Amino acid sequence: SVSVALFTCDLRVRDNPVLHAAVRGARHTVPLFVVDAGVRAAGFAVPNRAAFLAACLADLDGALRDRGGRLVVPHGDVVAETCRVAAAAGASTVHVAGDVSGYAARREERLRAALGAAGRRLIVHDASVTAVPPGALAPAGKDHFAVFTPYFRRWSGTPLRGVLNAPRAVRVPDVRSAPLPAPSGLAPGTPSPGLPEGGESAARRRLRAWENGPLNAYAERHDDLAGDATSRLSPYLHFGCVSAVELVHRARRHGGAGAEAFVRQLAWRDFHHQVLAARRDAAHRDYRDRRRVGWRDEKALAAAVDAWRAGRTGFPVIDAAMRQLRHEGWMHNRGRLLAAGFLTKTLNVHWRVGARHFLDLLVDGDLANNQLNWQWAAGTGTDTRPGRVLNPLAQARRYDPRGDYVRRWVPELAGAGGSAVHRPWRLAADLDYPEPLVEPW
Ligand code: FAD
């Protein structure tokens, strides 16, 4: 028999339930990735993620070739192309990872109907993207957890599936494929210069460096902006170059306070996924309507929003974070919290405006994590203190006490020593650096 392994956000051969099941259950398997026109139409194809994705696909194709196979990469509508390839190969089953966005849910529904009409079966693998499948845990009488702490308690006690080996051989039937896409073929525009390298091989290198390096000190150092002591695995998790299940198993085996704190962050990822799975409209609407301060008209604030995007708010720690985003396609979590808090609680601009800018640049840009973290920062999400406003100056002194993070990203201020860099309004008047957008408090 013949099967199709439809790759989506699980671009790896190790611990991949979709590939594993497709290969195990069939004589021949088509490893398939459809360059989906719908993703582009939805505005999700941006240069940073396109460049990273192209590298992921090339690496995945290499891993499949090492096993005697290859990746089949047609362009077009994901449902039509999957059906066409399944028919051409005579496949009876198509395997795909379960995913949480409205887009993924519609894709799954359409696939099931179209394949079913041709007598083929769609098999959805739920523990592919998250460690614990969304929907697996819920408080009595509810469809999801709205508060992290009780979720985390249940999540921690939930047994995970075991880690799956990469298949030794993948036998691919004779089907047509387009050449692998170049980054420029996936999205127009230029990627950020400091983008990480995409793909499962790069993810394994990153993972080993992380486990042999900063992991043990993660509990104390994860908020240190200049120390940069987090895993930077988020882009690899977003594209599925490494699996969340494997990361949790490995961290638990590693043990210690750092690994425990890291596992807790992975649970946050699952938490946001299960919220979005249950409340798909939270990707664009307030999850909770409980802000005390209303939104200001962003058109009236266009100049301030532009300054925020450009990293010229006059608040050095925020500007450093926004420039890191533009340069690397990535931003430290503390920077994300400060930048998002400033836009939504100091300028009172709707979180959707900032979330869109992040999605335009973040290489880990992810609907569940981005939109729900933005809602958290804006006070419309699952946070327990919606009225809290982070003070950029106090936060900068705490998380960048020597000012190194600011000096790295804001060269205009490189001459200011120590933490004085956080208060440029007290420095020489001829600096080429903007006045603060609002009165510092
Ligand atoms: P580590 O500190 O090493 O954490 C390990 C992993 O845990 C991360 O890779 C990530 O998968 C997960 N994780 C950590 N913190 C969170 C969190 N708060 N919520 C969900 N998962 C988490 N993360 C994304 O992956 N994509 C996004 O688009 C995204 N947008 C964000 C927007 C805002 C406004 C904020 C405040 C946070 C956002 N995050 C997002 C969460 C977090 O900032 C990043 O996951 C983290 O900075 C990635 O760096 P790392 O891999 O070094 O993280």
Image (cartoon, rainbow, N blue to C red):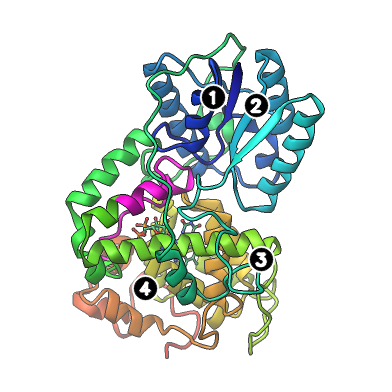
Q: Are marks 1 and 2 in contact (CB under 8 Å)?
A: yes
Q: Earlier in the sequence, mark 1 or mark 4?
A: 1
For the point 44% across and 67% down, the residue is 336
| Alpha carbon separation for disc pair 1 and 2 | 9 Å
Residues shaded magenta: 226-249
| Alpha carbon separation for disc pair 2 and 4 | 54 Å
- Residue named by callout 2: 93
Is 323 part of what is drawn in magenta? no
Quarter holding residue 418: bottom left
Q: Nearer the viewer, residue 390 or 235?
A: 235
Q: Give the percent coordinates (x, y) of residue 391.
A: 41, 85
| Alpha carbon separation for disc pair 4 and 3 | 31 Å
Tell me the tag on residue 316: 4
Ligand 1 occupies quarter: bottom left
* Amino acid type indicated by mark 4: Pro
Quadrant in which the N terminus is drawn: top right
* Amino acid type indicated by mark 2: Thr
Discs 2/4, front = 2
* Amino acid type indicated by mark 1: Gly
Q: Are marks 4 and 3 in contact (CB under 8 Å)?
A: no
